[in-house]
Image (cartoon, coloured by chain):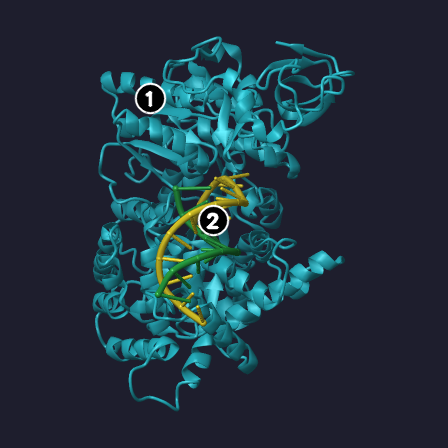
Chain colours: A cyan, B yellow, C green
Amino acid sequence: MSHQPHHASTQDPLLAGLNNKQLEAVTLPQQSALILAGAGSGKTRVLTARIAWLIQTEQVSPTGLLAVTFTNKAAKEMLTRITASLPINTRGMWVGTFHGLCNRLLRAHYREAGLPASFQILDIADQLSVIKRLMKLLNVDDEKFPPKQVQNYINGCKDEGLRAHAVDAYDPHSQKLREIFEEYDKQCQRDGVADFAELLLRCYELLERNTNIRQHYQSRFRYILVDEFQDTNRLQYQWLKLLAGKDNCMFAVGDDDQSIYGFRGARVGNMRDFETDFHIQTIVKLEENYRSHSNILDAANAIISHNKNRLGKNLWTSAGAGEPVRIYQAYNDNDEAQFIVDEIKMLHAEGMGLSEIALLYRSNAQSRVLEHALFSANLPYRVYGGLRFFERAEIKHALAYMRLIANANDDTALLRVINFPTRGIGARSLEQLQEAARAANCSLWQAASSSLKTEDSGQKKGIPAFVALIRAMVNQAYGIKLSELVELAITMSGLMAHYESEKEGEDRIENLKELVTAAVSFANQDFGNHNNVDGETEQDLLTQFLSHASLEAGEHQADVGREALQLMTVHASKGLEFKTVFISGLEEGLCPHEQSAYEASGLEEERRLMYVAVTRARQRLYLSHAQSRMLHGQVRYGIPSRFLDEIPDELLKHLNSKPVVKSGSNRDYSELPAMMSKQQSSGQKNAMPWKIGQQVAHAKFGNGVVVSYEGNANDMRVQVNFGREGLKWLALEFAKLNPI
DNA sequence: TTAGCCCACTCCCGT
DNA sequence: AGTGGGCTAA
């Protein structure tokens, strides 16, 4: 291989149309590199052009590349673009998500990794049910140890690359957590299942401990390319370092300003570590933005400039200033939704396509009010991030039967369907079964089937009937096609009959039929595609299909093609762009979220979230906030988000100075004391000098909103939400509060 | 002992 | 709004 720089020619169709910075990144010499790619700067284009260029200049063969992304969508897009620019077969290329690639490696080397060949993957819901079950068994108080927190703890440890024995625990509480962690891992091992984080950790350990395997892959993957590098957690970075070894090149593309997954272990610091660990000489910054007009970019730049911990980058565009950023102050959440509906109707009447418009919000709970308003206005919309196909109850039931066919020791799958459809196995029988399994230290399936050996004549009921059913399924499943197996699972189990007898079961029946269709196309599309992993064993299609179901939970909703508004969380919007974007709910407590105040550097991540949201817009951006909204079944009052103050006024257009009560709004301040009745048992309405919802000013804490009060006329205290200063209780006798 | 119904509870973001 | 626990009828 030559160490001469490869001369880029702008005649080359691969490189045509790239700007200087992009061209520099694509044609960098053989060395590890960090590309700081701002929002809308052509990141994916650079990544795929780099791959194509490396192959075309014969610096590497397609099989010598490893390209890692976070989402299946990004991986697919990369493959599509590579195929479009080069006449090569992408079949042997390793392009995929961290989880998908680790799964592939573990399937190929399952023995060395200590897993059964048909190990199953637990999604978050499965994982939670394992934890709950285990905690019951260990008699752990779920008040002191909420299962969700235990789950976060376990995943957090694994994301850091830690097993239970390696975790520090100096107090009884953390010692208990560690104990549950250890037992949980034992349980998973016994069941032959792996959760998401386990896929990565197990794969890391495999490579670390097994020198032959490690060296094999190190000498194969000379070039490692990583997308969204800022989202990698500690374990993922360690995994990458291990694969890169001393000699391979790593091409990392990322944007520290768009790191919004800290809550699940992402470490922006990996970017700085990468610089030192890999002796990075060149950092290429892609700052020219091809997406938005400059008013939008300037707003984004202004917001993000308030963050201290940045590598530093400023987006610019040669497009004009464009429209001002519009701000709307709503009276309440219904009013906000109504405003959005009215604007959309206007835009639509002017010819803007509905699918060009996105409604973004911080949390999924906010979508309901918007959906209601859109539904009433007869505007078609599509919500991303709801229940996905493979997460639906009826689908998970069907998959559970299929999982049992593949591996009956899977306790989670067994418990899901042992009594669904109901076959007379209640809580008492299950308790006895679990007791038996624990005594014999075996799986529930083994316990259930061993008690059966003696009597096998006559009509079976309850557990024996279930055991017989699964055995019959396994017998009939032998040698049949995948789609036939799905059909067999949903009919023999009685699932189909159960939903057919149900009044409202039509959708579920449709979904079950859809599962058969999914199996057909999976078999067609994937046959001979993934089953040839470096000459290793050919894993069966059922196991592949089940992995696929866990790793790619599937499309969010069926009606993809329809012209509809796009509703999603800010997190889900990363990487997408729209002509018009509405960001709603910009209030203190919601955005930035109140929980973020308790997290280290939580506020900076919230600001990055805001930055991501703003940079989704191409032409027109609406920012809205409401004085009150219904949240968690209670009315909440909030002051405008601090992020709004961070945008220079000359970029803004305030659509209203004061919220106007629209005729459609069904709430009024005068009703509020009654609605807040929960909190004002001892309060006296008449003596109340401040109404709930009243905006007030305080010398030290600034502006806030009264959210509740207590005490009597002589000794009244009010609770005020000061936003950035938090919630404060103030005694009216002493505190100097002025109404605004 | 099990099945089905009703009521209460929580809810940020997600591969 | 979806889930889980508790109660009741069989």
Residue closer to the observer: A20 or A646: A646
Quadrant in which residue A578 is drawn: top left
The dot on residue A494 is: none
Instruction: Give the image location of residue A184, x and y in percent.
Output: 57, 66
Residue closer to the observer: A491 or A124: A491
Instruction: Give the image location of residue A188, x and y in percent.
Output: 51, 68
Residue closer to the observer: A96 or A550: A550
Q: Chain of mark 2?
A: A
Secondary structure at numbered mark 2: loop
Instruction: Give the image location of residue A132, x and y in percent.
Output: 54, 60
User: Callout 2 environment at 10 Å: few (<14), some (14 to 19), or many (20+)?
Assistant: some
Name the residue type under label 2.
Gln
Q: Residues at badges 1 and 2 in contact (C-beta under 8 Å)?
A: no
Q: Is residue A645 visible?
A: yes
**Image point (33%, 17%), residue name:** A343
Q: Chain of mark 1?
A: A
Q: Answer left or right for A318 relative to A432.
A: left
Relative to A248, is A688 above or below?
A: above
Quadrant in which residue A372 is drawn: top left
How far is mark 1 from mark 2, CA to CA?
53 Å
Query: Dot 1 corresponds to which residue?
Result: A341
Q: Residue furthest bottom?
A: A454
Position of the N terminus of chain A, as image quadrant, is bottom left
Query: Dot 2 corresponds to which residue?
Result: A30
Q: Answer left or right for A164 relative to A519.
A: right
Q: Sequence-wise, which precedes: disc 1 or disc 2? A: 2
**Image point (57%, 52%), residue name:** A152
**Image point (51%, 78%), residue name:** A437
**Pointer 1 and pointer 2 on the same chain:** yes
Q: Answer left or right for A211 relative to A484.
A: right
